[in-house]
Amino acid sequence: MKNILISLTVLLLPVIIHAQNKSPFSAREIKDVRVATPGLFAKSNHLYLHLDSLQEHEYAFPLPGGKVISAYGTRGGHSGADIKTCAKDTIRAAFDGIVRMSKPYYAYGNLVVIRHPNGLETLYSHNFKNFVQSGDTVKAGQPIGLTGRTGRATTEHVHFETRINGQHFNPNLIFDMKEKTLRKGCVKCTKNGNGIVVKTHTPDNRVAQNNQIKK
């Protein structure tokens, strides 16, 4: 009887481990960078990222002490910002989230993509080493890898991107890339056909005042 129980345990163990490690993402979400987030714009064509509601422990600059050596939009349409300190420096998660991708990926080299609760995704690439796997839950400021020059890179750095529904946009709308601080405002993301328009959102105070008067 004891031998039978041991045999059953050995047989079922891989199944149990697989169930525990099952990723919440589809095969394509784990495989490709540019994929839409399921249901993100199902209820509205507008999505708001309320950066002003985040507490200090809920965000982190991806490479503290780093300097931007290539900004978004440069070099004929750079999809992110290249931030440099030194080789094998610690890369940190910008916000709480779940790791969607962690793998070598074409010119990106070793990359990590994190999906955050508000729909934002952040990408970190050219890493010497990744510390996380797809499906891992991470906290803001948690080490997720080391800077490197894997993929198409000429020096050790982290290539940092911000994306909504698979489309990249200027990370300077989220972080002040020069001061390495979080923007304290609101970012509006609008679905426009197959694309997404991302810009800083300023509430109309006149409308708010009128609503208060009517009340």
Image (tube, grey):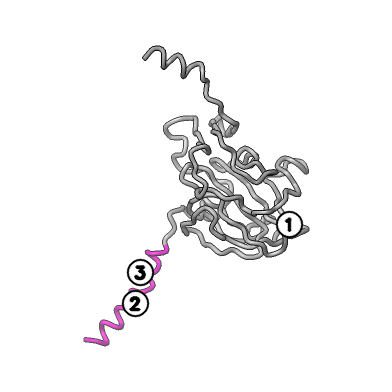
Disc 2/disc 3 C-alpha distance (Å): 10 Å
Q: Residues within 10 Å of mark 2 (few under 14, many from 20)?
A: few
Considering only vertical position in the picture, is 60 above or below 215?
Answer: below
Disc 1/disc 2 C-alpha distance (Å): 43 Å
Among the two numbered marks 3 and 1 on one chain, the one whose residue lies closer to the N terminus: 3
Name the residue tied to disc 2: 11
Lateral position of residue 116 relative to residue 68, left or right: left
Is residue 189 something one can see in this rendering? no
Quadrant occupied by the N terminus: bottom left
Q: Position of residue 151 (x, y in %)?
A: 70, 59
Among the two numbered marks 1 and 2 on one chain, the one whose residue lies closer to the N terminus: 2
Name the residue tied to disc 3: 16
Name the residue tied to disc 1: 152
Q: Amino acid at mark 2?
A: Leu
Considering only vertical position in the picture, is 57 above or below 198?
Answer: below
Q: Is residue 190 magenta?
A: no
Residue appearing at x 56%, y 54% in the figure: 93
Quadrant occupied by the C terminus: top left
Is residue 125 something one can see in this rendering? yes
Lateral position of residue 5 relative to residue 68, left or right: left
